[in-house]
Image: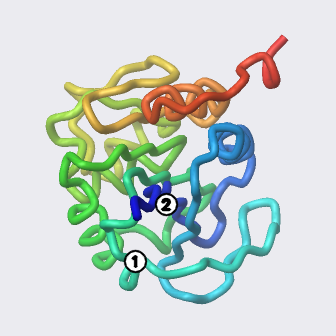
Amino acid sequence: MNKQKATGILLYPRFSEYELSVLLSVLSQGGKKVIYLGLDHEPVKGEAGLPCIPETSINLIDLKTIDSLILPGVDDFKHLVNHEELSAFLKKANDQKRLIGAISSAPYLLSMSGLLDHKKYTTGLTFEQRRFLGTFNEKNYSSSNVVIDKNMITAKGSAFIEFAFGFGDLLNLNYNKDWYIQ
């Protein structure tokens, strides 16, 4: 029996719920299975206070069950800076077999893991913030709203609709764009 692979959605404290809203709808319309991953099994609250319970953790997920991964932005990511377990997970997930999407501040998580060293990217973080964090390759930065480079898609937080469409298109999902834009 051929089981459909899922999109893993990473949930961590203070994740930006609105950045996932259209994406979750696109995935649902496209019939794409979703699995919610936590840094552990503890419930988390998004930046607007939405409580969420991860289905599994980054340490327990069988990467063979997912073909894509989403990292939402986070309004305060002090708790994620140099997070070794998360960095190790992202490095394992980046085996060119998976589409990885990061929006708003989440490209930092890819950058801290070394995954943006040779990729074009965008982020909602300012030049000063990127310089302070010290992990971004500025030569590869683009001011575009959404950037696709091979198996990665990055976006500014305000481009959450474009990001959702780009991710859905890269997964070849069938969904109705007119539902979201006039």
Which quadrant does the N terminus fall into? bottom left
- Name the residue carrying label 1: 61
- Which numbered tag is attached to residue 49? none
CB of mark 2 within 8 Å of CB of mark 1?
A: yes
Return the residue at label 2. 8
The crowd level at tag 2 (other Cα within 10 Å; few <14, some 14-19, many 20+) is many
- Quadrant of the image occupied by residue 121: top left
Q: How is the image coloured?
A: rainbow
Which of the 4 quarters of the picture holds residue 179? top right
Left or right, 112 with respect to 8, comes to left
Which residue is rendered at x = 59% and y = 79% of the image? 55
Amino acid at circle 1: Ile
Q: Is residue 99 above or below residue 59?
A: above
> Which amino acid, by three-letter code, is at mark 2?
Gly
Above or below, comparing residue 128 to residue 8 in the picture: above
49 versus 68 height, above or below: below
SS class of the residue under badge 2?
strand
User: How far apart are the two marked residues, 2 and 1, measured between alpha carbons?
Assistant: 9 Å
Percent x, y of residue 114:
19, 53
Please report the residue visible at 39 percent of the width from the left and 66 percent of the height from the top: 65
**How many numbered discs?**
2
Is tag 2's residue or tag 1's residue first in the polypeptide sequence? 2
* 77 vs 161, nearest the viewer: 161
Question: What secondary structure is found at the residue carrying circle 1?
Answer: loop
Residue drawn 49% across and 69% down? 78
Task: Classify mark 1: residues with Cα within 10 Å, few (<14), some (14-19) or many (20+).
Answer: some
